[in-house]
Image (tube, rainbow, N blue to C red):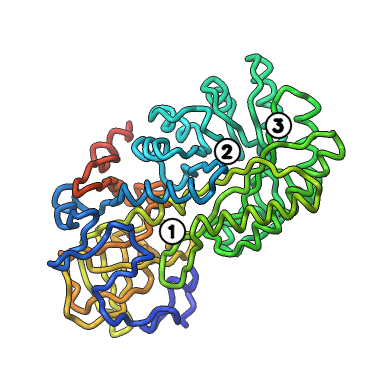
């Protein structure tokens, strides 16, 4: 291992790849768990989604392009709605939000979680019923809270004492009584990346349970009476596969529920366990099905409520990644293929960290496949990299691609529905890619590609 001031990701050498990655018996084969449900190779070897080949998509919309399998997304909405029967399922809009997706999740009977004024504006402009919207965020402005109240948002998740004061003053001024929840920081560190673990004590979200702030926040809201306190909220992180974190979180937050009952004689009627359910990015990931998650979470809550002699509250969850993540792949065109002294082969594509920052930011792992044709060549361990002026501009750290991959080929990267378009940037003044929804063999543009004119239109200098 060669040391590097920017970290091991930039300095590693050798071509063996991670221990879990094995050469495929067939370099053209797809791992079904990684791809949208309607993706397959046609008889010509070209990758197709819902019957539409990626060559046609690239010809019509260019590359890079995010390709959404609409029926896959809708079926995942239904899986959560039916698997969590009787539970309010809030789609976490931060994963990916546009008006078309808002309409899809609304039509499938889901609620929607937003965390900024921009996300709220998108939801309302797409016709999402405001009573089915939850509003998150650790620093909601007066303007954002005012808009939420005026729109009639169904619930606001309180995140600080300052926010309690702001919302209380606004509610008094308007003569309304908004429904609220207290976000509780329960001190559980989810088994995930440090930057996406959100329930340990040393971070910006919520009210500390251990320090007593969560109880104080609940008492303040109840005693003042201006806001309608519906329940407690806990979110322990993202890309979680182990239910033990939810068990500890539920035990602690329901302990607070019992404390509130004992101190104020009130049993809060709702409990939100957050989201963070993991998906398969590579063959090392093994996510649980929604119905299995539902059974585990219900069992945990029922057991803890029995222990505290509490009525089982009405539950809600907030999956985002688990719904949209697997429903999208990104399609790129190969520009150069470079073998570096037998150390590694770099396959450069026409996108990169501006359309998927997660590899650079979180050291995330992805898969990839040659999409525009089948190949009889031997598998070659490659690194798929972007076009940006950064050595850390990596899309897929290690993947076996055919040894004959060449400029002009199309490469597809699955699992890019969550946080890729949402976190996309204009680094190096690269316009952000479009999003195309495919259904029944037809593609429609739901987010258009940015242009150089768009970039220059913002530059008023």
Q: CA distance from mark 2 to mark 3?
A: 15 Å
Residue contact at pointers 2 and 3, CB within 8 angstroms: no
Counting residues from the start of the chain, the first of labels 2 and 1 encountered is 2
- Residue designated by label 1: 358
Picture residue at 66% right of the left edge, 21% below the top: 177
Residue 72, placed above or below residue 4: above
Total numbered badges shown on the rendered structure: 3
Which tag is nearer the camera, tag 3 or tag 1? 3
Residue contact at pointers 2 and 1, CB within 8 angstroms: no
Residue 408 x/y as whole percent: 15, 64
Which tag is nearer the camera, tag 2 or tag 3? 3
Is residue 320 visible in this depiction of the protein?
A: yes
Is residue 334 visible in this depiction of the protein?
A: no
Picture residue at 39% right of the left edge, 27% below the top: 125
**Residue 229: numbered disc:** 3
Quarter-wise, where is residue 154 in the image? top right
Q: CA distance from mark 3 to mark 1?
A: 36 Å
Closer to the camera, 375 or 88?
Answer: 88
- Residue designated by label 2: 136
């Amino acid at each position: 291992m060669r040391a590097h001031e920017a970290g091991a990701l930039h300095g590693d050498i050798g071509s063996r790849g991670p221990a879990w990655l094995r050469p495929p018996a067939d370099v053209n084969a797809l791992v079904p768990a990684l791809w949208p449900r309607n993706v397959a190779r046609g008889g010509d070897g070209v990758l197709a989604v819902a019957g539409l080949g990626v060559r046609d998509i690239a010809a019509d919309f260019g590359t890079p392009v995010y390709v959404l399998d609409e029926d896959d997304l809708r079926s995942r909405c239904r899986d959560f709605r039916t698997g969590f029967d009787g539970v309010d399922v809030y789609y976490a809009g931060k994963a990916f939000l546009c008006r078309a997706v808002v309409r899809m999740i609304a039509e499938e009977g889901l609620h929607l979680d937003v965390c900024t004024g921009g996300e709220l504006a998108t939801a309302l402009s797409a016709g999402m019923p405001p009573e089915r919207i939850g509003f998150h965020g650790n620093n909601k402005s007066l303007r954002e809270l005012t808009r939420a109240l005026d729109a009639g948002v169904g619930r606001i998740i309180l995140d600080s004492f300052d926010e309690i004061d702001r919302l209380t003053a606004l509610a008094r001024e308007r003569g309304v009584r908004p429904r609220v929840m207290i976000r509780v920081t329960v001190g559980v560190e989810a088994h995930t990346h440090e930057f996406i673990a959100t329930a340990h004590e040393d971070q910006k979200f919520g009210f500390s349970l251990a320090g007593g702030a969560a109880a104080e926040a609940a008492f303040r809201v109840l005693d003042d009476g201006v806001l309608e306190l519906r329940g407690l909220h806990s979110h322990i992180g993202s890309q979680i596969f182990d239910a033990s974190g939810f068990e500890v979180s539920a035990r602690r937050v329901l302990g607070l529920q019992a404390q509130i009952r004992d101190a104020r004689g009130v049993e809060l009627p709702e409990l939100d366990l957050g989201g963070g359910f993991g998906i398969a990015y590579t063959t090392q990931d093994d996510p649980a099905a929604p119905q299995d998650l539902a059974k585990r979470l219900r069992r945990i809550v029922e057991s803890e409520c029995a222990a505290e002699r509490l009525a089982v509250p009405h539950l809600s969850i907030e999956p985002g990644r688990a719904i949209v993540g697997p429903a999208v792949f990104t399609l790129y065109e190969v520009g150069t293929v470079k073998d570096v002294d037998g150390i590694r082969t770099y396959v450069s594509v026409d996108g990169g960290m501006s359309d998927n920052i997660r590899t650079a930011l979180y050291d995330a792992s992805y898969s990839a496949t040659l999409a525009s044709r089948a190949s009889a060549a031997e598998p070659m361990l490659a690194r798929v990299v972007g076009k940006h002026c950064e050595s850390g501009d990596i899309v897929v750290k290690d993947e076996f691609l055919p040894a004959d991959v060449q400029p002009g080929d199309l490469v597809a990267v699955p699992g890019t529905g969550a946080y890729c378009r949402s976190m996309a940037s204009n680094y190096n003044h690269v316009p952000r890619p479009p999003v195309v929804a495919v259904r029944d063999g037809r593609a429609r543009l739901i987010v258009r590609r940015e242009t150089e004119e768009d970039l220059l239109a913002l530059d008023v200098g």
